[in-house]
Image (cartoon, helix red, strand yellow):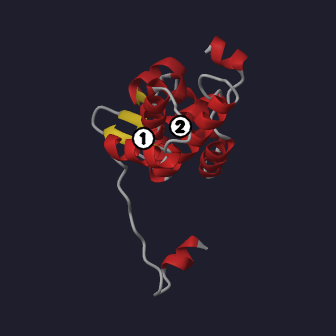
Amino acid sequence: WFGQLVREPAVSVVTLRPLQDHEIDRLMSFAIGDVIRLSVPVLHEVRERSDGNPLFAEELLRSAVDAHRTGEDRPRALPLSLHAIIRERLKGCSEEERGTLRRASLLGRRFRVALLAEIFGGEISSLRQILERMSGLQLIDVLDAEQGDYQFRHALTRDVVYGEMPAESVRSL
């Protein structure tokens, strides 16, 4: 339905660049105003985790405010709204692709395909094909195609993928 929508003459597509740190800071300042005071580390965490995405920043900030109001220093988990958005994007992945993303999430936000293959097995060429598809779904970005360096598009995407694994599996891996 989205493809049909963007072909309509009255529809325009606007691509936004990620906000810079000072823009996220300003957004947060306007959002909370003088109503509540969050600590500098909490605001810094919101800025860092949002990766310049204003929707992510707003939802993370809302979660931080809610945590502050209940006496917690920091929000405990990813807000449900963001979790749902990211899980929706992951629906486009096959089980093999999700498995590759899970294993990559164990290596951190940034990872190298050769290390992924060395640790978990698999052919580098097959893994590159999977990662290219994941890049097309905007789940990961290619940092250096020649070296095989990738990163999760958003730190929050990595958090959701990593969080899908049972704690016992993570420990053993």
From the image, tell me which residue sits under label 1: 51
* Amino acid found under the numbered disc labelled 2: Leu
State the separation of the CA atoms marked 2 and 1.
9 Å
* Amino acid found under the numbered disc labelled 1: Asp
- Please, which residue is most extreme toward the front here? 34
Whether residue 150 is situated above or below residue 8 in the rendered picture: above
- The quarter in which the C terminus is drawn is top right
Check if mark 2's residue and mark 1's residue have beta carbons within 8 Å.
Answer: yes
x 60%, y 22%: residue: 73
| Crowdedness near tag 1: few (<14), some (14–19) or many (≥20) residues, C-alpha within 10 Å | some
Viewer-nearest residue: 162 or 121: 162
- The quarter in which the N terminus is drawn is bottom right
From the image, tell me which residue sits under label 2: 156
Viewer-nearest residue: 168 or 31: 31
Rendering quarter of residue 169: top right
51 vs 87, left or right, is left
Q: Which mark is residue 40?
A: none
State the image coordinates of residue 22 (x, y, percent, origin top left): 32, 42
119 vs 168, left or right, is left
Marked residue nearer the N-terminal end (2 or 1): 1
